[in-house]
Amino acid sequence: MAGKGSNSVQVRHYNERVVLESIRKLTEASKADVARYANLTPAAIAMIIDALESSGFIKQIGKRFGQRGQPSIMYRLVPERAYSIGIRIGRRALDAVLVDFAGAIQAQESHEYAFPEPDHVRRSGNNAIKAFKDWLGKDLQSRLVGIGIAAPYFLGGWGEELGFPPELSSKWEEVDLPALFANDDDIPVYIENDGSAAALAELVGGNGARFDDFMHISIDTLIGGGLVQNGQLQTGPNGNTAALGPFPVSRSNLASVKAPPGPFDILLHRASVYVLVDHLRASGVEVFRVRELDPPSPGSREPIAQWQADCADAIAQAIVGIISIVDIEAVIIDSILPRIILQDLVAGIQSRLCEVVPVGLLVPEIIVGSVGRLGSAIGGAMLPIYARFAPDSSVLVKKSQLRKPLLVGSRTMNAAEIGRIAASK
C-alpha cells in the first residue's frame, strides 16, 4: 500500500476510525467483539482500543460474564468527548439538535413557520445555536466539532404546490448556506441534502445500522430519499443521489390532485405530506399540521385511507425502479406523519409492491424507520462527527491522488449553485 501513498500512520488512523465506528454500531463491545466486527487482528485491536481509551474516546463500562473463558471487559464511546449541532431547514419548520459523541440528543428546538423566509430561518437557527452553547457552557464548547445543515435543494421552490410567495425562490438563490448562521468561533460547517442526512441518521442510530445497503425514503412535506451502500452514505458527484421527488410514476387516482400535463406524474405529487393535507381539505377536513391527525378524527379516516392507497401505489412503483438499478437489502421509510398512519402506509406499500414487482427482481425488506421527524436534524448533527471520526478510505491515499474529497457533506456551495447543478441533471 506504500506505493499508493499510504504509510503506517495513515493506516493506523483509518483503523482507529474503524474501531470507533464498530463500537458505535455495537453500542458496547469487548476487544474480541470489535476484532470480529472490524475484521482486524486481536493484537491490533488491543493496541488501538488501549490508545483510544487513554485519549478519552472510549471507556470501560464493566465486565461481561456468562461466556466461556475469562470475563470480557466491555467498552463504550465517551459521550462527552465531542458534541455537534444539527440544523434541518424544512419547508414548514426548522429543527435543531445538539448531539453528543455517541449520537444521543442532549438538547433540541423546533421553530415552525408558514414558509421558510431566510431572515426568519436565520434568527431561529441562531437562537438554537446560542441555546446549545449556553447548555454546553464554556468548558464544553471547545468540544463542539461542527455544525451540520440539512436542507432540501430548491428550498424556496415548489411554491405553487406549497403556497409560497413567488419571490421566495429568488431569495434563497442569494443565500450562502455555510454562512447563514452566526459562527463567531469559526466552527466547521457541513452541508447536506435533507434526505441524505435522514439516511445517515438511520444508518448511525436507527434500523439502518443492521444493513449495509439500503434506500431511505423520507415522507416529509415533500418526499425525499437517501442511499447507503457498503455501509456508507452515497451522495454522488453533485450531491443529488436518491432525489426521489422527480421520479416518474403513473397518474394519481385522487380527485384532489391536479392532473399532470403529460402521461406521467412525479412521485412528489403523489407521496408527499402536502398532498395528504390538500386531500383532507378537499374532503372537508381542515388541517394545517399532520400532528393534528394524532389521533385521526373520525371524519379524516376515509380521506387518509384514500391517500395512503394512492401513496403506497406510487412508492411501490418507485421501489421497482430503484431495485431495477441498485441491489439493496432494505427500504426504510420514515416520516413526519403520526406513527400509526406511517405504519399503515408501510403495510400498504409492502402489499402493493408484491403485486407490481416483475419477475427477475428481488424484493427488499420494507420497514418503518426508527428516527422519526428529527431524522434530518440528527443526520445533520452527525455530519461533522462522521467527517472527523468515521472510516474513510481517503485517509489512506495522498490528497493529490484523489479526484475529489470524500468527506461526507463537506460542500460549501450556496443555494444558487446547488440549484443550478441539480437542475442540470
Image (cartoon, rainbow, N blue to C red):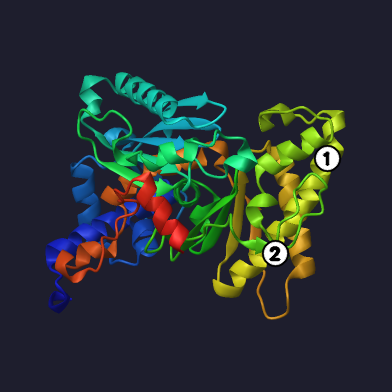
Element assignment for label 2: helix
Q: What residue type is labelled 2?
A: Gln
Q: Earlier in the sequence, mark 1 or mark 2?
A: 1
**Disc 2: which residue:** 317
Q: Which residue is drawn at 61% across and 61% down?
A: 247
C-alpha distance separating marks 1 and 2: 21 Å
Q: Residue at x 73, y 41 (%)?
A: 276
Q: Relative to residue 132, is residue 384 depicted above or below?
A: below
**Disc 1: which residue:** 303
Q: Splitting the image into 4 quarters, where does residue 12 fall?
A: bottom left
Which quadrant of the figure contains the N terminus?
Answer: bottom left
Q: Nearer the viewer, residue 247 or 328?
A: 247
Near mark 2 (Cα within 10 A), the count class, few <14, some 14-19 or many ≥20, is many
Q: Tell me if 141 is positioned left or right of 156 in this view.
A: left
Q: Which residue is drawn at 22% across and 39% down?
A: 56
Element assignment for label 1: helix
Tag of residue 228 = none
Q: Tell me if 9 is positioned left or right of 299 in this view.
A: left
Q: Relative to residue 420, is residue 344 depicted above or below?
A: above
Q: Tell me if 189 is positioned left or right of 359 in this view.
A: left
Q: Which of 238 and 305 is in front in this view?
A: 238
Q: Where is residue 199 in the image (x, y as percent from the top left)?
A: 49, 51
Q: Which of 15 and 192 is in front in this view?
A: 192
Q: Is residue 60 in view?
A: no
Q: Where is residue 188 in the image (x, y as percent from the top left)?
A: 25, 40
